[in-house]
Image (cartoon, coloured by chain):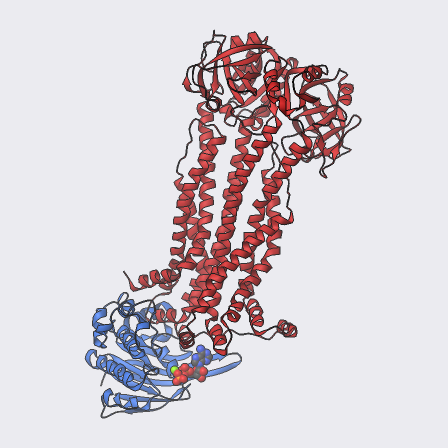
């Protein structure tokens, strides 16, 4: 039995805007295992990002329980969550979110500056095939290249979990494939637990497990017996 | 270097224009603080040192003639530490190569041949006169320098009607004459007024003062009550024609410097807070905007595990860099200007040395205040940034909500063009920001007005003093009071056209517990040369027994026409009368009170007397007149009103244009700081909006109109407020300058307001136009592609 990295019980998140209450998550029970690559699928507004934000310690749950190994995230202070993010989590976002005034290397160094056991920025960039663009500013990189720098930044701290919210959402298929390759390699080579949100059903084929969301809850969980390489994915 | 630090430096470089604009305003505050504080300290320290080392006296008193033995009694008064008696006389001087006469204040040196024990002259060159010599003199250094005298040079002095040739044996500086001002003049003039230290024996024999004195100075023991000593001294001197003792506060030189020191202190405390306040607002505005733009980056930093403290510090540091730039500029310019000011002061104040301690604490305080200002300005925004929840920071900010309000309906009713509508809407969406900008700009206007009024006030002062009140060309000072027949002697001098006499009588005016020592000026009825002018510019004549007083006297003694005032004569029979205030007259220099000759002689039951003669001259006979008065025994000095007016105008013009220039620069810097930053922020907030308009087919200038329009609208709205604050600030300044030495009227013609507004509006327009260029360079495609 593989180690459980994330464990949620009756996880609820409600947003209150104006008078109305929105149940972004309504009682999610989920286990995510070490070294697993999980894909989260589901229609827009079904609560995927909300879940990812809570797992990554970016947001608080309204009720229920979230465990990261032995750490109960629901009772942690902001300060402790910051520490948790710094030590254990790598994020990749749809809109890359690079700091425009820093080069590729410096963007990665933002993480290596504060992480406890980071790899060198150059090594992280090499892993995503960006060695030759190391001193470029974000404005001088294509979308796919920017996203790969973002992944390098996420993995440079050797995180235990890599959380990716629509990493290919803004990319065409061939650059998207490059980015997915990078994620898969990290997952395989470093054993990093990876969770990837996508709208693209084709991508599920590269996952160990596929979790489907619907209206703030899990509709189904499926295990892929055979996985295919990102390069074989077409969309 | 950490990646975050690199971001900091690059952000700072990207924002250099805005940072510099803020830094310059901050630098102004630092510079003024440093200059005023540095000068204040320099003057205060130097004065204190000079006073202490050279035994500056605590109390002065004059008598007509008191016997030497009285000094023992004076020394024995409780509270007196040292008492020193001397002979003091004004002499008419005839300097080689100078047609015009000069005036000397002769002070006796002790018989022992030693220096006096109080008000010790500091020997600068040569030696003291021999106590036995009858032709030796030591002069004050500035007098020697102004006239090009060397040790051994000679000049002539008229002593009791006898001309004597005196040889200069040395030069000195005295704590009593740091600001050396001659009798009847407004400004120091070292060429025509000198201090002459002479042997006691020689002065005493010339002025019939053997075994007597007419001036006494005291130092007090620690803890002594000055007013009690003065009272006791007055009682002792009264039988000998004492004219009333006074302390340091009424010693002319000291009073002038004290006024100057007070003004520097005011400047150091009033002005810098204005600059720091505006800087804090600017920092707040700019950092707030940067943080709004960088929400996503802040969220990212948080997601990556940067702490709140890290993030807050990052933005506070960004402001800190600006502050450092401002502090460096302020320190450099402040250091230079303090030194320059010290040089300027050296022209007016004759110190033997200037203790210009670089006051590290002033540097530290100004630097600290500037950094604090930036931190305060940045803190709220930075804390806000740190408080952003990481998840929320990841999503783009919700578009600002524009609500339809009553105001909108009003705007709609006006049928404004779409761009005009955008200007008004934006103004009302950030009313606080608009209000702060307007207040900042109004301060710029106010600062210009509050200083600009000086030049108008000064011309008004000069006009009233010289063209209306004192219309004589020259004032001849008599050695002592004379009868009216002396005027006939004057009339016979070459070139004299009109002559009128005046009498100065030292008195103490009292109204209840309030009292002032001053001189009553007595004039003949219908005098046309020296006259009194009221606030409305009309000539005021008193007929009857009443007393005319100046506005300042009316203010300090709380008197109004019709009130009665107690007048104690400090000379002659020393009687006390109660007189009625007949009117109030405008006079900006010193304190004054006026009576008619008839009223005075009736009151004192004596024949009319005069102590000065006002004269108008035929200009072609100027030289003959000047030569003649040097040999006229009854005259001890001549004050040239025309020269005084010229030197007043010159001094005022120089000082005022420096002040005006300085404060225009200050107003311009404030305006640039505010408008440049506002425009940059407007542009960054509206880049998309403006680009959309361009894509819709609006021209560059139509789009620019929105940017320029909003800023200029705020600037225009700021003007009336600026005028109001300027008016108030001007009054405050005038009031803070007012002293018994001089008062400054508030004269603010529309031109003063207009100048300030033109400068500020012009600068604002130039600043926006500088930013407007960026609209031409707006890359429509990339603007529309960016996330925000
Ligand atoms: N800050 C918020 N305030 C209010 N409601 C929110 C907020 N964030 C998310 N929601 C709501 O919560 C629900 C879930 O949002 P979430 O972002 O998790 O959806 P998602 O599955 O990631 O959708 P998408 O695929 O479009 O990114 C949605 O209905 C959304 O409107
Ligand atoms: Mg989402």
Quarter placement of the C terminus of chain A: bottom left
Observer-nearest residue: B179 or A42? B179
The chain coloured blue in the image: A
Instruction: Give the percent coordinates (x, y) of residue B727.
Output: 62, 48
Observer-nearest residue: A93 or B424? B424
Instruction: Give the percent coordinates (x, y) of residue B477.
Output: 63, 19
Residue B519 in view here: yes
In the displayed structure, would residue B235 be above or below residue A64? Answer: above
Where on the picture, by quarter, is residue B232?
top right
Residue B443 in view here: no
The chain coloured red in the image: B
In the displayed structure, would residue A185 be above or below residue B26? Answer: below
In the displayed structure image, the side of residue B616 where residue B190 appears, left or right: left
Instruction: Give the percent coordinates (x, y) of residue B766.
Output: 50, 58
Q: Which residue shows up at 47% across the image and 83% down it?
A: A22
In the displayed structure image, the side of residue B725 where residue A50 appears, left or right: left
Q: Which residue shows up at 56% across the image and 10% down it?
A: B163
Ligand 1 is in which quadrant of the figure? bottom left
Q: Residue furthest right?
A: B544
Quarter placement of the N terminus of chain A: bottom left
In the displayed structure image, the side of residue B111 where residue B332 appears, left or right: left
Q: Count every numbered label the image shows and give the total.
A: 0
Q: Residue furthest left?
A: A189
């Amino acid at each position: 039995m593989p180690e459980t990295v994330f464990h949620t019980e009756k996880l609820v998140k409600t947003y209150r805007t104006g008078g109305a209450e929105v149940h972004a998550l309504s009682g999610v029970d989920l286990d995510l295992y070490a070294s697993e690559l999980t894909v989260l699928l589901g229609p827009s507004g079904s609560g995927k990002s909300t879940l990812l934000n809570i797992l990554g310690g970016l947001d608080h749950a309204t009720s229920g329980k979230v465990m990261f190994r032995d750490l109960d995230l629901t009772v942690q202070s902001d300060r402790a969550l910051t520490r948790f993010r710094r030590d254990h989590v790598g994020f990749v976002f749809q809109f890359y979110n690079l700091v425009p005034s820093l080069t590729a290397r410096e963007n990665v160094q933002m993480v290596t500056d504060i992480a406890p056991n980071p790899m060198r920025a150059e090594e992280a960039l090499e892993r995503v095939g960006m060695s030759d663009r190391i001193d470029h500013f974000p404005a001088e990189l294509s979308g796919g290249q920017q996203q790969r720098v973002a992944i390098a930044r996420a993995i440079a701290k050797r995180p235990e979990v890599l959380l990716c919210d629509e990493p290919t959402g803004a990319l065409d298929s061939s650059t998207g494939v490059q980015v997915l390759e990078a994620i898969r390699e990290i997952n395989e080579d470093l054993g990093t637990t990876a969770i990837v949100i996508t709208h693209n059903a084709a991508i599920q084929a590269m996952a160990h497990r596929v979790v489907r969301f619907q209206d703030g809850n899990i509709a189904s969980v499926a295990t892929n017996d055979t996985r295919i390489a990102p390069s074989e994915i077409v969309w | 270097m950490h990646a975050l630090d690199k971001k900091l430096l690059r952000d700072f470089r990207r924002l250099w224009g805005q940072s510099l604009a803020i830094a310059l305003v901050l630098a102004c505050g630092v510079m003024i603080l440093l200059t005023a504080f540095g000068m204040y300290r320099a003057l205060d320290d130097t004065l204190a040192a000079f006073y202490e080392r050279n035994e500056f006296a605590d109390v002065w008193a004059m008598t007509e003639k008191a016997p030497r033995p009285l000094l023992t009694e004076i020394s024995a008064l409780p509270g007196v530490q040292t008492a020193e008696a001397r002979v003091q006389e004004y002499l008419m001087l005839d300097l080689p190569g100078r047609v015009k006469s000069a005036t000397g204040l002769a002070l006796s040196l002790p018989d022992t041949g030693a220096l006096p024990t109080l008000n010790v002259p500091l020997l600068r060159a040569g030696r003291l006169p021999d106590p036995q010599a009858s032709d030796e003199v030591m002069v004050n250094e500035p007098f020697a320098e102004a006239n090009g005298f060397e040790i051994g040079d000679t000049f002539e002095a008229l002593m009791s009607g006898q001309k004597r040739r005196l040889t200069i044996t040395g030069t000195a500086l005295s704590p009593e004459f740091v600001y050396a001002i001659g009798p009847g003049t407004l400004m120091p003039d070292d060429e025509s007024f000198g201090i002459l230290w002479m042997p006691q024996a020689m002065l005493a024999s010339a002025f019939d003062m053997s075994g007597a004195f007419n001036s006494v100075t005291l130092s007090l023991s620690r803890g002594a009550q000055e007013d009690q000593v003065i009272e006791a001294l007055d009682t002792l001197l009264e039988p000998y024609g004492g004219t009333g003792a006074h302390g340091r506060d009424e010693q002319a030189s000291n009073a002038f410097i004290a006024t100057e020191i007070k003004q520097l202190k005011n400047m150091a405390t009033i002005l810098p807070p204005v600059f720091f306040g505006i800087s804090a607002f600017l920092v707040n505005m700019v950092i707030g905007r940067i943080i709004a733009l960088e929400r996503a980056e802040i969220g990212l930093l948080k997601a990556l595990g940067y702490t709140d403290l890290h993030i807050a510090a990052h933005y506070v540091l960004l402001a800190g860099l600006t502050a450092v730039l401002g502090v460096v500029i302020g320190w450099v310019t402040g250091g230079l200007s303090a030194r320059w000011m010290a040089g300027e002061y050296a022209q007016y104040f004759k110190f033997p040395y200037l203790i210009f301690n670089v006051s590290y604490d002033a540097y530290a305080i100004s630097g600290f205040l500037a950094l604090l200002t930036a931190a305060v300005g940045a803190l709220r925004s930075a804390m806000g940034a740190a408080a952003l929840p990481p998840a929320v920071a990841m999503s783009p900010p919700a578009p600002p909500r524009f609500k339809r309000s009553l105001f909108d309906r009003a705007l709609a009713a006006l049928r404004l063009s779409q761009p005009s509508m955008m200007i008004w809407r934006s103004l009302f969406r950030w009313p606080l920001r608009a209000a702060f900008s307007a207040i900042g700009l109004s301060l710029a206007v106010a600062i210009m007005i509050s200083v600009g009024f000086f030049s108008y006030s000064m011309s008004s002062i000069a006009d009233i003093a010289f063209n209306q009140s004192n219309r004589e060309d020259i004032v001849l000072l008599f050695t002592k009071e004379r009868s009216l027949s002396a005027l006939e002697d004057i009339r016979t001098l070459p070139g004299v056209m009109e002559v009128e006499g005046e009498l100065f009588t030292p008195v103490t005016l009292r109204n209840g517990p309030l009292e002032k020592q001053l001189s009553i000026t007595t004039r003949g009825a219908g005098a046309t040369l020296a006259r009194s002018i009221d606030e409305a510019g009309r000539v005021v004549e008193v007929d009857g027994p009443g007393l005319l007083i100046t506005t300042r006297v009316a203010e300090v003694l709380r008197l109004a026409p019709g009130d009665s005032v107690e007048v104690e004569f400090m000379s002659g029979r020393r009687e006390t009368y109660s007189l009625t205030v007949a009117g109030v007259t405008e006079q900006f220099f010193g304190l004054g009170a006026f009576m008619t000759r008839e009223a005075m002689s009736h009151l004192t039951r004596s024949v009319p007397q005069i102590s000065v003669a006002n004269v108008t001259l035929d200009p072609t006979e100027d030289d003959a007149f000047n030569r003649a008065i040097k040999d006229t025994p009854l005259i001890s000095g001549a004050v040239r009103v025309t020269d005084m007016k010229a030197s007043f105008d010159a001094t005022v013009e120089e000082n005022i244009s420096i002040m005006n220039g300085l404060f225009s620069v200050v107003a311009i810097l404030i305006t640039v700081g505010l408008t440049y930053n506002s425009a940059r922020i407007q542009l960054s907030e509206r880049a998309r909006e403006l680009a959309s308009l361009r894509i819709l087919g609006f021209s560059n200038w139509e789009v620019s109109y929105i940017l320029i329009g909003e800023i200029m609208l705020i600037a225009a709205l700021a003007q009336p407020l600026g005028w109001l604050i300027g008016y108030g600030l001007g009054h405050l300044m005038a009031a803070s300058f007012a002293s018994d030495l001089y008062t400054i009227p508030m004269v603010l013609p529309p031109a003063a307001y207009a100048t300030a507004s033109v400068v500020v509006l012009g600068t604002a327009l130039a600043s926006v136009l500088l930013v407007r260029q960026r609209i031409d360079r707006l890359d429509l495609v990339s603007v529309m592609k960016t996330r925000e």
